Image (cartoon, rainbow, N blue to C red):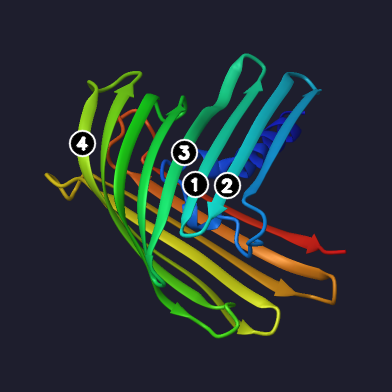
Amino acid sequence: MKTFLYLFITIAYLSGQSLQAQIVNIEERRIKGTNDSTYWYGSLRLGSNISKVRDQILQFNATGHVQYKKDKSLTLLLLDGNFLRAGNEDFQESAFSHLRFNYSLKENMIAELFVQAQFNKLLLIDLRTLGGAGLRFRLFKSKDGGQRVYFGTAYLYEKNEFSEGISDRNWHRLSSYVSFTLQPAEGVKLVSTTYFQPTLSDLANYRFSTEWRLDTPIGKKLSFFSAFSYSRDRALPVEAPISIYAWLNGLAFKF
């Protein structure tokens, strides 16, 4: 019974790992290939699950995505929340909201403004708020648009309220990322985004996050995917886990 319980918790925990990472991967959340006649795009997903073997397991998650695009501007709102309890113990309790405004200065350069708020019980973050601005550059785009490379850099200011361990801290950070999509063979796609966010006063105080996903076709409608993510936050209390990683493998069927 305990083996089943721990297996269920592990699967549920890994499925919500994107919420544990304290860097929001905006590159993978933008809606691409939009129609110029349609300005609004979005989705809302709500899920819940309850089961009992020996202990009761309760899980709830919510994801919201709203995007407004017109002419040279784009506004993006992201909302995520996840809760997992087994018996009397909370294994996960986290949420974030992210609002971003983009304005195209040139064909390959975009100005960005953003604000974000989040909490994560597992990482001892009662509340983290931040805001910033920067530039996003498109370094490469193939003729068919299937292969792309982006680089972004921004300044951000954050305020942290921790539940224990250290007093609340405020920092100025430099945020940089590299994102690319490659198609080395027909039907094969490799997507990666890597962030690095050191404080301006102490480079040893940094956040690092990287996400990789490989999709490989098996047949006309079936494909295999492998996704790996890793994040490291050196600004957390000593009692909190500094590093988090997840590796997911599965099959996807398109019809």
Q: Earlier in the sequence, mark 3 or mark 2?
A: 2
The image shows residue 160, relative to residue 220, as above or below, that is above
Q: Mark 1: which amino acid?
A: Thr
Q: Earlier in the sequence, mark 4 or mark 1?
A: 1
Element marked by disc 1: strand
Identify which residue is drawn at 73% across, 67% down: 224
Q: Which mark sits nearer the N-terminus, 4 or 3?
A: 3
The CA span between labels 2 and 4 is: 29 Å
Q: Are marks 2 and 1 in contact (CB under 8 Å)?
A: yes
Q: Few, some or many C-alpha atoms within 10 Å of disc 1 (few <14, some 14-19, many ≥20)?
A: some
Q: Mark 3 to mark 2: distance in Å?
A: 12 Å
- Residue 106 appears left or right of 95: left
Closer to the eye: label 4 or 3: 3
Location of mark 2 (residue): 67
Question: Which of label 3 and label 2 is nearer to you?
Answer: 2
Instruction: Using the numbered discs, state the Cα–Cα distance from disc 3 to disc 1 in whole angstroms.
Output: 11 Å
Q: Which mark is residue 98?
A: 3
